[in-house]
Image: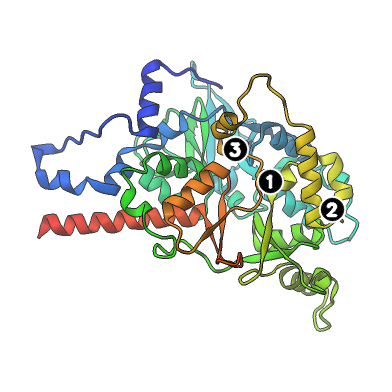
Amino acid sequence: MAQLRAPADKQRQQEALHGEKDDVVVVGGGSESNKKARAGLCGVLRERKVVDLARAKRRLVEVPYTATLAHTANALLAARVSAVAVAAPPGHWIGAGGSMILESDPATGAVRKHYIGMVNMLDILAHIAEADDEAVDLDRRMAVPVSSVIGHSLEGLTLWTLHPNTSVLDCMETFSKGVHRALVPLESSADNVVAVELVESAPGYRMLTQMDVERFLRAHGAELKGVLSRTVRELGAVSEAVFAVASGARVIDAIKAMRAASLTAVPVVDAGVGEETLQDVDPPLFQTELRILFRVLIHALAAGVGKKAVGTFSATDLRDCPVARLQPWLGISVTEFKRKVAEYRESNKPVVPGADAPAAAAAATDEEQSNEQPLVTCFLESTLGEAIEAAATRHVHRLWAVDGEGLLRGVVSLTDVLRAVREAALGEDRELHNIVSS
């Protein structure tokens, strides 16, 4: 249920996001040593709470457990979100990962609904990719209830929530392990602050994402200058394990490959002679599922390092494709698919008279983006601040690291960014404690 914020709450929210109010740290006994220990990067990340970031988010987007996958995909497209919560009547389900996340009436406290899981585009792609036949009956596969695909992706195996008083630093620990989003209750019934909760009852929730935390870091660039001025290579924020898909690969083969490797996005690389048909080669020593798995992992996806990146193929591209048009487009190349989706997106873009397009784009949230600019890159010597700025302004969840010739050298994901900042903060904190104790 949408909630109104008092002016004081709004002011506090702006202060939390943009640092408009100086931090005042009150420490028992007035110990100067304790004040020094809480200063610096760790101090900034410890003092800010996730509820301050969550208040800025819009009402939670959800679907009932009885909704079909087609309806769910349409909800993702209509709301411009990457994932939706699945709601069911209380008392009939066990939530993903054994969670018990409930929404209660703010007046009576009576439980109204039970959030049993989260479904994103990768869950839907995994379900589509399970079809063994070449001609996927998409209508039939998209007619199943959304509750049947919860947990198809690794992240969907557990429904994550964060206590509202969790610090941004502790939130980063969760997000640096590959969790992309979590529910945050605006009010919590839990007495103790535990970063990750499995049991919660609250009158309302907001979705907090990795991008929200990344934008918080960007807003506090002046305070975090020490770590943001270091290079992504120096901080170990570049992963060299990059799988790519050839520009001529079919959409259905790319989907199956992404499902098998649990990837939500892959770079599209220039295909050399014969590379576009690699997925049609049968390894003679493999049978049935092993042969299919071999073809998916080895032929549809290839090592991307050292190859020329020309674009990105992601779950967002499939989200932006209307369900009615997905079936005939599964057999075309990923390059052609992206062109068709871009044309459809452009032809269906709402026009607001008098709206300032750049301002509107800058104000859009992480959950409202469509990756209109498909290839965003950085260099190994780019600073972390530059990487964060590029990800935030271009609304992407990963940057492809390239060399001077545009050849792939790795990938910098939001998971890598948050892990690097957290490790740098903890390292700085240990150094401060050592100085104080010496």
Q: Residue at x 41, y 45 (%)?
A: 171
Q: Which residue is mark 3?
A: 367
Q: Is residue 128 left or right of residue 52?
A: right
In the foreground, 380 or 337: 380
Query: Mark 2 vs mark 1: which is more N-terminal?
Result: 1
Q: Residue 415 location in percent, x, y?
A: 49, 54
> Looking at the picture, which amino acid does disc 1 mark?
Thr
Residue 227 is at least partly visible in this image: yes
Q: Residue 44 location in percent, x, y?
A: 30, 42
Q: What is the spatial separation of the Cα atoms under label 3 and label 1, in whole angstroms?
A: 11 Å
Residue 194 is at least partly visible in this image: no
SS state under label 2: loop
Q: Residue at x 86, y 42 (%)?
A: 325
Q: Residue at x 48, y 52 (%)?
A: 387
Residue 330, which numbered label? 2
Q: Residue furthest front?
A: 404
In the foreground, 97 or 85: 85
Do the residues bearing badges 2 and 1 touch, measured as CB atoms within 8 Å? no
Q: Badge 2, how many Cα within 10 Å: few under 14, some, many 20+?
A: some
SS state under label 3: helix
Q: Residue 213 location in percent, x, y?
A: 45, 43
> Looking at the picture, which amino acid does disc 2 mark?
Leu
Q: What is the spatial separation of the Cα atoms under label 3 and label 2, in whole angstroms?
A: 25 Å
Q: Residue 225 location in percent, x, y?
A: 33, 49
Q: Which residue is mark 1?
A: 316
Q: Badge 3, how many Cα within 10 Å: few under 14, some, many 20+?
A: many
In the image, residue 124 above or below residue 253: above
